[in-house]
Image: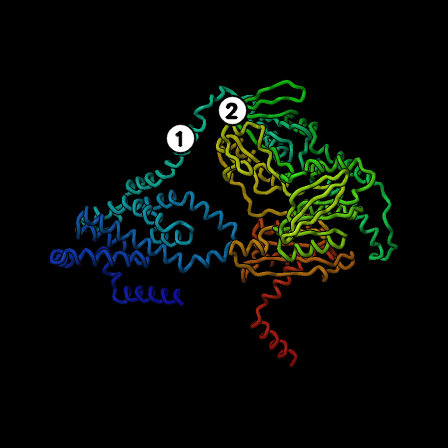
Amino acid sequence: MKKIFLVLLMALVAGLFFYFDLNELLTLQGMKESLSSFETWRVSSPLVAAALFFAVYVVVTALSLPGAVMMTLAGGALFGLIWGTVIVSFASSIGALLAFLVSRYLLRSMVESRFDGERLRAMNEGIQRDGPFYLFTLRLVPLFPFFMINLLMGLTALRGATFYWVSQLGMLAGTLVYVNAGTQLAQLDSLSGILSPALLFSFALLGLFPLLAKKGLAILKRRRIYARWQRPARYDRNMVVIGGGAGGLVSSYIAAAVKAKVTLIETHKMGGDCLNYGCIPSKALIRSAKLAHQMRHATHYGLTSAEPSFSFKQVMQRVHDVISAVAPHDSIERYTDLGVEVLQGYARIVDPWTVEITLNDGTIQKLTTRSIVIATGARPFVPPLPGLDEVGYVTSDTLWERFATLDVPPKRLVVLGGGPIGCELAQSMARLGSHVIQIEMAPRIMIREDEDVADLAAASLQRDGIELLTGHKALRCELEGSQKFIIVEHQGKELRIEFDELLCAVGRAARLSGYGLEELGVETARTIVTNEYLETIYPNIYAAGDVAGPYQFTHTAAHQAWYAAVNALFGNLRRFKVDYRVIPWATFVDPEIARVGLNEQEAKEKGVAYELTRYGMDDLDRAIADGAAHGFVKVLTVPGKDKILGVTIVGEHAGDLLAEFVLAMKHGLGLNKILGTIHSYPTWAEANKYAAGEWKRAHAPEKLMVWLSRYHAWRRG
């Protein structure tokens, strides 16, 4: 009601303005004809005239009414150059601020409801950082309609105080020009005489000043950062990449593809964590475990159930065989053939352009390079639990070698952590015969997923025999002879759990030490701190992948690597801001969990309005035929529109099904486009189309349906 009242009041004032033909008064001819009357009044009551002029100017500007230019001329004609400039400068700035605030009050919430939270957040961060520069530039150039600037800036997160003082300073030059012209109002024949092409060009150059100043400050900042270092006269390489995981491999591949001279340095195994310890071995283990599970439940498929008979060593050998089969894709030989020089050893950055490599044979080599990409990845985080080292433990990195020596899976396995890695490995080991106790300090597993998603995952793990202990905090480990125990706390009581093996899966920490970052002063927190171009404080040193954050996925490491490599090689020509708007992720428990964009939990935390559409897999023909009719597709859309804000899929092949929604979100396609796309029958992919159909059904035009019913009834006679 307050907004409606404000709009009505503004409409009333604007209506009166035009009803009494005040717009005619604020024309050049009208102003010249009335100048003598105004002048007489000003002489007789100077303070009243100034106050009234000031108030009218504020109202005209605040309501974005035509006539601000003429009032500026009138200010010069009535009050002279100095006082006219003072009055007009403050009146125009206050009026602009009011227009800015009115726009924010009336329109900003509507704009926010139409755009997704991530895009708005990025825009607002840019405005907070660079908004004053851009506003100042626009204010310096009279070619841009100031009333439009007021209204548009009101839709951003720019602070009102900042808007005011920047406007006050930025409009001063233009105000002086117009007020000065107003002192000669009687001689003016047209407004075109005020702004000559030469003057407009001068204003345009003046408008570039803040941007040039910002660029100059950046150059000075860069000179200060590099001041204590001696730049090489020439460079051995265009790029040196540290780390042979996904981020490093893609960075070096791109550099070689564009004919840059690039060296890739890897300490241990090519392919990084994903190939050797993470994605590939875990999925191989998951596949074997799923087959064992299906054999136990063969009656579900009309067959005779059987307890699988297998050698755990052979299962783990298959895991290593899979790693060996994939390894050539990331091998030294392949990348050497692609044009990348690969060195095996430890790299340390000794100055912004020099990398010292201690090769595995003990020799030391130094390379100078134009740019450096740090892609050193992350390692499992081991919590500082008292007694943990005494009882022994494995991580997602070390279990592959440790378990490969076991004839049978661990009888009692404690998994510490309820995130994706912990859940995947816990379920696999339970299906292969271990009694698994999974301990999670949070009130539920998969804490970053929606509650209904986490509940479905928890139910699936429990069906596989996993003992889930959520809300349990690990306190310490104890060793009594050959017996191993972990002590946890729940609701104020301690619980003692015996185990044979303990798997730490409580997260991963970026590899930050040993690379010379501390000596260089490169800022680190939990990861290397970079800007939106993936630059560190040194503009020629970049970070990509887990070591840069904010996501620890192989596909985001590869995604960042493109930006790091291109900016490192061509940043002097053009730089690209890394785009995190559409990031998919998947957890390969059974059933799989995959999502992109916002889920309900995040939308509520960020205050993003959404509509929810849900399609149950129990309705999908292919899911029923495959005996896997569980899970759902959950789509968040902008209220009243088919624009996708986020999607969560739970079910068989969820990670594969998600790709269609990733493509749609990346290219701005809505649910109507998915609904209008032919999907093969019977396939799992139809679930995406049926989810779009659920949205369409909920938005069917009811009134039109009523008329169509009447039309068909009429046609029947």
View extreme (front): residue: 480
Q: Which residue is mark 2?
A: 351
Q: Are marks 1 and 2 in contact (CB under 8 Å)?
A: no
Looking at this view, is 69 or 56 the one in front?
Answer: 56
Whole-percent x, y for residue 271 in the image: 68, 33
Left or right of 420 in this view: 410: right
Farthest residue to the bottom: give it.
717
Residue 275, can we see it?
no
Real-space Cα separation, disc 1 to disc 2, in angstroms: 19 Å
Judged from the image, the secondary structure of the residue bearing numbered disc 1 is helix
Q: Is residue 59 left or right of residue 185?
A: right
Disc 2 marks which amino acid? Asp
Q: Which mark is residue 220?
A: 1
* In-front residue for pair 274/665: 274
Q: Earlier in the sequence, mark 1 or mark 2?
A: 1
* Residue 49 drawn above or below residue 697: above
Of labels 1 and 2, the one closer to you: 2
* In the rendered image, the vertical position of residue 303 relative to residue 579, given as above or below: below
Q: Between 69 and 666, which is closer to the camera in this rendering?
A: 666
